[in-house]
Structure formats: C-alpha cells, structure tokens
Amino acid sequence: MAHRAHRWRAAAVTATAAGMITLGLAAPGASAATDPRVDLRVLVVDDGAGPVGAITAQLRSEGVPYTTVKLDDSGRPAITAAFLSDTVGGRPRAKFQGVVLPNEAPFGAGSAEQTALEAYEKTYGIPQLDAYTWAHPEVGLDYTDGNGYAGPLDGRAATVSEAGRAGAFGYLKGGFSFEDNSPSVDESYGFVAQPRTGFTSYVDTPVPGGTGTGSLLGEYTHDGRRELVVTFAYNEYQQQFRVLARGMVEWLTQGVHLGQARNYFAVHVDDVFAPDARWDSERNCTPGDIDCAGGGGDTETPIRMTQADAQYAAQWEQSHGFTLDMVYNAGAGEEWKSENGGQDPMADQLLQDRAKYRWVNHTYTHLFLGCVQDTSTVPWSCAKNADGSTRWVSRSDISKEVSDNYNWGLTHGLSLDRGELVTGEHSGLKTLPQQPQDNPGLGPALAANGVKWTASDNSRESVQRTVGSSTLTVPRYPMNVYYNVGTKAEMADEYNWIYTSKADGGSGICEDNPTSTCLAQPLDTATGFTDRIVPAEAHTDLGHVLGNDPRPHYAHQSNLAEDRNLYPVLERVLADYQDLFADNTPIVNLRQSAIGAELQNRAKWQTALDGGRVTAYRIGNTVTVNAPYGTQIPVTAPEGTRQQQLLGTTTFGTAYAGERAAWGAPGLLQSALTLKLP
C-alpha cells in the first residue's frame, strides 16, 4: 500500500490508481509549519444495530481508540465544529481520523449536525464509513431496479475487485462467499447495484436475475469527501464481515492507526505419551471416567497413538507447513512402557522427530491438581477434612508433577519453555460447580517452578487472569473432536448422544439449552463425522482465526490415532484460509508463552485506553504516541515506516497483510514513540 509525503491542501481529493487517497485536506492557511494535527482516534456514531456494533468490535479487538456517540442517548453531545476540531498550541486539530456512521446521513440531510460533520470531513480529509445503507444515487449507486437486486445473500459468491486488492483489501486473494448456515433462515440481506460516477467498487457479486456484476462495497468520492459504502447487513460473527473487517479499518484509518491484527491459529495436542479412555456407545459414557455411573475400570481398549501415527504426524506437519504443540505426560508414558515389556515405539518415534514439534509440560502423570475428589457419587464432589474444610491436593504434589515432567523433557532434548504449563483437565484452577476457587497451593507451586503461563479452558474462563502472585492463564478453545473416541463412527455416536433429543435416543441437553450444534435428527455414524462434524468444527475454528484471536485450540493424542480424526478438521481450516488470503497474510502460529504475552499486552493496552492515558496523533508524516511507562504500544503503518531513535531511525515493525505492525515502545532516553511515515 503506497503512501507518499504531501502538503495538506484545500481542494477536492481524487482517487489514486491503488484506490487510496492522499491523507487529508488543509485547514485554511496551513503550511509546512502548521500542518493540522490529526488524532489517531475514530468517531463511532451508533444506532444500536449490528453493522455498527461489528465495526466497533473490530476496532476494540485491534486496539484502535474510538469515541462512541449513541443516537438514542438524550444526553449525547451534539456533533458540532467544536466537538470535532479545535486548536492545540496554535495548530488546527482534527480530533478523529475517521468516522463510522450507521448510514450516509444519520442526522438527516441538511441538518446542523450533518452539515458540521461533512464540513469537518472536507476540511481535514477525514474518511467516512457508512456501515450499512441501501443502493441509491446519494451514495453513488443506481437504484436496484437498474440491473440490481435487493434480497437475501446467503451462499452467494463475492469477489474483491482489482481496485480493492490494489488498496485496503490487498490481503485477500479475491473470492469469498456469504454464510449460509441454515436453509430455513435468511442470514444476510443486501443490495447489489451499479456504480455511478465517482464510485469505485471494491467488492462485487453477480447480479441475481440480472447481467454482469454489481457492487456490495465500494468507495464514493464526491464533494471533497470519501465514503466507504456498504450495502449488505452483517454482524461481528459472520464470516463475510470477518474477511473484510481488516480492510474496512485500514480504509477508515488510511493505513495508519493504533492497534494491530493478525490471523492466529495454534493447536495443542494434550495427553501425548498417555492413553485416553474410550467412549462406550451402550452406556453413553466413558468407562474409567469418574462421571461414568457404575464405572469400575476401562471396559474397552484405551486409545493411544502407534509408531505409524507418530510418523504420520511428522509427515503431516511438513506437508501442511503447520507446527503442532505436543502437550506431554512423561510419567504416563513411562508407566505404559513398563506395562508393555519396556518397549514404546510410538514414544521413540516422537522423540526421534522431537525437533519438528513444540513441546509443552502437561504434568508427569496427569494428576488432578484441585481438591481431592470424592468419587462415591456422580457427579464427584470435593472431599472434606474433619473440620469441614476442603481437602486439597498438596502444594508439594503439584510441584512434583510440574518439575518431574519438565526435567524428563530436558533430559530427552525437548524444545521446552519452562514458563509454560497445561495442567491435567486444567485442574488446580477453579472448577464449577464443585470447586469454586483455585487450589490455594497452585499459585505458589507454579511460582516456585517458574511457570508464567498456565492454560485454562476458554469455555469456562475466556479472560486471562492471575493465578497466585505471578502466573497468568492462557485460555484455550476446546475442539469438538472428542478425547475419548478413536474412530469417526465413535465420534458421530457420541455427538448424537450429546446433541439429539431424548426421543431420538440422545441426552436431551439441547431441549433445555438449544445451540447451533443441536441436531434435528441423529447423524449417520458412517458419514456424519465427515459430512457434518468436520465442516461445523472447521467453521467455528476458522471464525476464531479470522477474529484476531490468538487463543490456542486443544485436542488430544487420541485424535491423532486410529482414524486420525483431528487432521480432516485442521486440513479444512487451512484450506479454507488459503482460499481466502493472499500470501502476504499467513496464519500466525505461536507457542503458548507468546500467546500469553499477546493477551497480557492487549489487556494493559486496553486499560491505558480506557483510562484516557494514551495520546496519539499525526502531523504530516510524523506519528507521535504517548502512553504510560512500560506499556507496549500497538501500531499499524505502511511499508517503509521507520522509528525515530535518539540517533537516526530504524525499521519499524514486521510485515503483515501489506503493512507493518508491532508492539512498540519509545526508544532509549525517549518519552514518546515516534514514527516517520514514508
């Protein structure tokens, strides 16, 4: 994305060949010494509808500062010249670098507020994003009766135009489709229309019932102003929005803003070296599991990878360019070896290929590290001491589980980070309803072993938090590929039990708590895994990838064994991703410690923003950011951006999606982060 140095000028803005615009227009009488200051903050005018909410969610996810004005708030500020701009030290200041509106004129055409806003945009060259509007000449489009269409868009194919790929949407390969998750529900409505003079389409789709293509999203340049016009409805979770959200923010901020976004995907494989229990399709539970009534021991052969499975894992990684995190229980592996003649070809193979994986400590024997469990009833409860207090697994037992496993890994040459840990079943952390608090011995044991990042279950705790005095959680997404199945048929059978009605032989849980995974009728166990479960789980996982969400996903070693159920899901996610994104926007595959640090940086940054402790602005081609000492500052800027140091400049950030971004900080002996744009 090309940006050039320029002088501010009081004249109409014209589009470049790349679909980008020189940044801004001049305040009257501007000169090189009095270039306006443009604050790096977005104004969001909110009508409470989904499209504005989606854009607001994207801004917050990236860490872009914004101010919201709610239209239905009787106490809201009026949109006036004074609200939008002022002077600082004699220099004209634009308080917002971009404006998000629910439509092209939410205050009413010709009203005082609309007039003030339009004058502000003309004066300072501020872009306006119309979150959702209909096709009509006032936004540069023909009415839909002129070779257009108005109606549902479910399942329809769309294409990013050449102009879109040359500009803010250059991270996309070209094509995508609108979601169609239910044939009985219209999930997205929109207007497909023909552009008029001044309108450049960035996203096109074939005109239903018409000829050629029409626009769904594009830029309307007119009267010295620029609008990004969106003519389809969406919410923050729909894939079509997720695909376009980055480009909408880049267009709105002209490629220079606080905050950053990546497409993250990491997969942890738990219980490596340990066997996993097997689902019993007759009893609809897992023998050996403490919640399986009438339990006793395992009644079926446990599920464990073979040497061939280990060989396949390494080959799969290489052919797909994706690294798995092997979350291992060494003690369980040693126990298996002792029970099988001292031989373990699977473990030997994994260790031979050790350098091909990342490895994470999962405790030595997978001991439950919370309260001592009383399994005399189903569900289990916490055992009590004589005085009625909770009986806890001891701090020393926790510490031994952590240290023994880590030391075994060092001895066997694993690529470990001492600061990373996944406890068995995320135990030790609070587990509702039985255990409403962390094991008091957990935090001290983790600190003593140098554990900085311990995994938690995102379905229980989605926000990073502190454990003890110095350890932070890393929430992980559980994948809907079950730990206790080795075959596709077993997976479909258990899925049926959970998600079908009692009348169909299921648990009936969906009758009380309906979800998108609930089934109208049971799956065919021969085909259900491939036809229903894989696309559904891959769609969910890809949604996380497209949501600027670094949290890892987790499955189990059993999912790499027998029918190897995990691979079809991963392959679908990776293939769908590659169909959408250009080579300059690869999946970012981080280890647990880096994910933890990313979440920590985001939380500190959001706290600084919420506290009003960040000041950021652009004057000409210089960006200046002040934040609380020690706060990492996320910035996205064009290629060629350099950071000003005490002496000279250095290249800023890393390349991603056609731009450069990083968590930055002021240079040595500097109080502010200063960037020089190309």
Image (cartoon, rainbow, N blue to C red):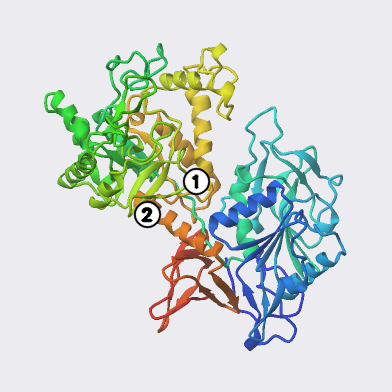
Gap between marks 1 and 2 measured at Cα: 16 Å
Sort mark 2 into few (<14), some (14-19) or many (20+) by Cα contacts within 10 Å: some
Q: Which one is nearer the viewer's eye here, 234 or 210?
A: 234
- Residue 167 in view (yes/no): no
Q: Which one is nearer the viewer's eye here, 436 or 561?
A: 436
Horizontal relation, residue 388 to residue 412: left or right: right
Horizontal relation, residue 161 to residue 223: left or right: left
Horizontal relation, residue 143 to residue 403: left or right: right
Residue 615 at x, y = what percent?
56, 72
Name the residue carrying label 1: 545
Name the residue carrying label 2: 594
Residue at the spot 54% in from the left edge and 69% down from the top edge: 614
Sort mark 1 into few (<14), some (14-19) or many (20+) by Cα contacts within 10 Å: many
The N terminus, quarter of image = bottom right
Amino acid type indicated by mark 1: Val
Which of the 4 image quarters holds residue 127? bottom right
Farthest left residue?
342
Sequence order check: which comes first, mark 1 or mark 2? 1
Secondary structure category for the residue under label 2: helix
Residue at the spot 48% in from the left edge and 25% down from the top edge: 530
Amino acid type indicated by mark 2: Ala
